[in-house]
Image (spheres, rainbow, N blue to C red):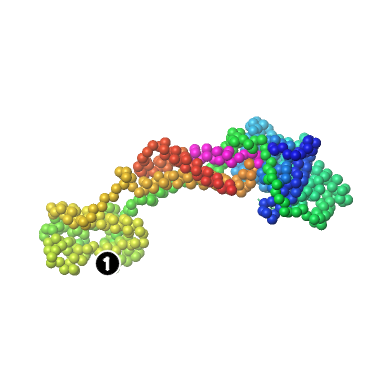
Amino acid sequence: MEEIEFDSVSKAKSSIIVRNAYKTYTPKNTILNGLDLTVPAGGIYGLLGPSGCGKTTLLNCIAGQLKLDCGSIWINAKKRSEIGFMPQAVSLHESMSIFENFFFYGYVFGMSSRAIQARAIDLITLLDLPSGHRIVGDLSGGQRRRISMAVAIIHDPKLMILDEPTAGLDPILSHSVWQNLKQFASAGKSIIVTTHYIQEVNDADMVGVMRNGVILSENSPQAIISNCHCNTIEEAYLLLSQKQECEEKKTDNVKPLEPFQVKYEEDDKLFSTKKFKAVLYKNAKQTRREYPFQILLMFLPVVSSWFFCTAIGRYPQRLKLAIVNEETNCNMYERNGCFLDSDSNVHISCLFLEALKNKTYEPEIYETDAKAWDGIRRSRAWGLLHFKRNYTNSLISRFNMPHELDEETILEGFVETRLDSSNFIISEITLKHDLVTSMLNILDTAMENCNMNPKILRPPLSITTVWPSNNANFVSYVASTFLILMCFSTPSLAASLQMFSEKSQGILERMRITGVSLKEIISVVILLQLITIVIQTLMIVSVMFWLFDHPMRGHWVTLFSLAAITGISGVLYGKTFRD
Ligand SMILES: Nc1ncnc2c1ncn2[C@@H]1O[C@H](COP(=O)(O)OP(=O)(O)OP(=O)(O)O)[C@@H](O)[C@H]1O
């Protein structure tokens, strides 16, 4: 902790000295307005003040969580383990048991398991807490507040900073908390405690009356009462407050000199393995307790990749087609003859429908065009194929007497097709492609059966599509992107949810006041997430590359390294939620 200009006599008699402290959150809102405070060594200092006067702000500055705009603070503690801080919010790990909360904070302060166990049992008896195995989230508000106090002093600190330990407690419990405080004070501890309840501070050794960011009076309760010529501390408090209203207020336009923050020895340490182990213990316990959520998170990527492989890039199957075939009912037709022979029984319409069936299409015969069209409108078919009475004959005429063809004969040689275009993939990509390729294929066969070169019927255009690797397709390319997306999104979701929950409950602040830094918190999350990523990547790889047979090029070490790096990026991204 930074040494500042306090004389050694004051320091010997005090545990906290605050001088000329200024603090603002916004330029027009001065919370601490030149505050002076001296907490004597040993005993209870009751900080009394109305809501919003800045008590919590002051305690956070003393604990090293907030910076003063200017002023100075001296604390008779070099290490964070010498102070015990109880925040105003309960800020406990609700999914963990009372014992687990004790163990976590005990480990943070470097205590052994045995020492924590012994101290936990003492505190449970002393503060009349429920069984240590109870889950904190299941307890009453009063019980949680007392556990919060017990957690703050698990390591038996010499200085206790307690922000409203009796808020929301019934009079009997409040009395018992104050009895405990007196017991701690008689054991030589220094305690600064804030309260709204004026009568409570009668039990304090020293009272600081705070209002509008300054200490109006600082003395023993009896001295304050007699100095104000009152009978009770309540009357004295009212009198001091009224007097301040009449006095000229200190100026709010203070020019900050040097911002000041209390520092402890371990604050300069880059990384603490002790704290890393404590956070690892906490996260492991939380993971075990929140197993349904963890299982969901673990299996989310593999379920998503299964859906991805099933839904994306698969060729639509068993599509229904409405067929009107005026040419024939296809009960009897020849497959291998030459359709140009006058005595052949080859019907191109039947060959075409057979080719479509082989591609898993399901043609349904309709009597008339109107009925078939009605079927499409009722979503019973994706397309309508209408073969005219002389369909095959018209094709024959194209070959046999191309110069004598009239328009009507030519038109009879076309399959009239209408497609439902409400689904782009089905109409534009699947149906159009399959109808054209099936027709070209059966014409190829028909031409070969007539000993003619099929190429003469092909459009004069040749298209070859080339992929860089032999059997990779679009989905295989997207599969790797999907894998990386999963490796990023799941850890980032897990990290941000944890950060959000701990921040909103004030746990993050509490941990940081005990000296746990983001470095240790993030390292633990990365470690746990790396284990998760390896398992998840294995599962995703099994689904994508083995079950759905997407080709895998490259080494598995590269794959897992990329997955791990992406996962770490995800954790870091998720952790940015702290701000
Ligand atoms: N992070 C913050 N940003 C802006 N204003 C803040 C912040 N924290 C506190 N304040 C404001 O500072 C003032 C003092 O708050 P503080 O919590 O220190 O008061 P308090 O005396 O502890 O009140 P209470 O007894 O109700 O807890 C309040 O007006 C509050 O709105």
Whether residue 483 appears in magenta in the rendering, the answer is: no
- Of 460 and 388, which appears nearest the observer? 460
Q: Quadrant of the N terminus?
A: top right
Left or right of residue 438, residue 134 in this image: right
Tell which residue pokes out farthest to the left in this image. Answer: 342
- Residue under numbered circle 1: 369
**Residue at 44%, 48% in the rendered image:** 304
- Secondary structure beneath disc 1? helix
Q: Nearer the viewer, residue 383 or 220?
A: 220
How packed is label 1: few (under 14 Cα within 10 Å), some, or many (20 or more)?
some
Q: Would residue 518 be counted in the magenta stretch?
A: yes
Residue 309 appears at what percent x and percent y?
Answer: 39, 47
Q: Which residue type does callout 1 highlight?
A: Asp
At x 73% / y 54%, what residue is drawn? 252
Residue 121 image-quadrant placement: top right
Q: What segment carries the magenta color?
A: 513-533
Q: Which residue is drawn at 28% across and 56% down?
A: 433
The answer to whether any part of residue 246 appears in the image is: yes
Identify whether 356 is placed above or below 59: below
Q: Which residue is drawn at the image coordinates 50% and 41% (left, top)?
A: 568
Picture quarter containing residue 366?
Answer: bottom left
Return the residue nearer the eye: 531 or 52.
52
Q: Where is residue 549 in the image (x, y as percent from the top left)?
A: 35, 43
Is residue 140 among the parts visible in the rendering? no
